[in-house]
Image (spheres, rainbow, N blue to C red):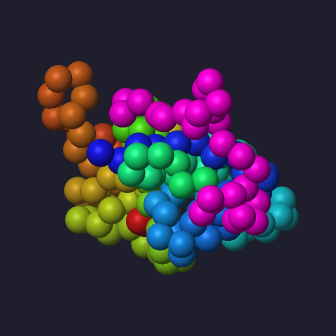
Amino acid sequence: MPSWFVITVKPRREFSVRDELDERGISCMVPVEHRIVRPSRHAKRRELQSRPILFGYAFVEAPGQLPWHAIADVPGVRGFIAQDDEPYRLRPADVDRLLAMSSVVAPDEDPERPISPGGDALITSGPFAGQVVKVSDIVGQDAQWVTKMFGSLRTVRIPLSSMVAA
């Protein structure tokens, strides 16, 4: 069964380290959050920005031991988190939480594209921020979707301005 390890990387190099390790055949994950931001404070246009949740860290999956010889020479890698001079293996529950944090997929097109019934949408603000939901209906300026809440299925209405198409 593969194990997950934590490596430390230079700040703002998380994505380049992940891409380099993937090219070398080593599975690497960087949990990200997605935000809708304005490029400048005067711009009306908004764009989707992805950034790491845990700056300076990446997570490597390896069968058995951490393949440090293949990771050490990647530009941007500083080291690994250790316990008793051995690379620390993450517990399965921690790995599940990390995978859940990184499960939100950024929309691959223009964030201003329309949201339509039956399509997926990323909620960008409010208590459901970060969730991707399937829109069931559009009512005026609100989108509706169904979720399990308080032990039963409930219809939730959210303003379209709080969502982007995913």
159 sits left or right of 73 in the view = left
**12 or 60, which is in the foreground?**
60
Residue at left offset 24%, top offset 39%: 147
4 sits left or right of 74 in the view = left
162 sits left or right of 57 in the view = left
Total residue callouts = 0
Question: Quadrant location of the N terminus?
Answer: top left
Q: Quadrant of residue 137?
A: bottom left
45 sits left or right of 1 in the view = right
Q: Quadrant of residue 3?
A: top left
- x then y, percent, for residue 37: 69, 58
List the single residue furthest toward the left.
152
Residue 87 sits inside the magenta stretch = yes
- x then y, percent, for residue 20: 61, 71
Residue at left offset 54%, top offset 75%: 23
Position of residue 1 relative to residue 117, above or below, is above
Residue 162 in view, yes or no: no
Residue at left offset 76%, top offset 50%: 78
- x then y, percent, for residue 164: 48, 62
The segment highlighted magenta reads 69-93
**16 or 75, which is in the foreground?**
75
Residue 145 in view, yes or no: yes
**123 or 20, which is in the foreground?**
20
**18 or 147, which is in the foreground?**
18
Question: Quadrant location of the C terminus?
Answer: bottom left
Residue 25 sits inside the magenta stretch = no
- x then y, percent, for residue 41: 83, 59
Residue at left offset 47%, top offset 70%: 25
Q: Quadrant of residue 92?
A: top left
Position of residue 16 relative to residue 125, above or below, is below
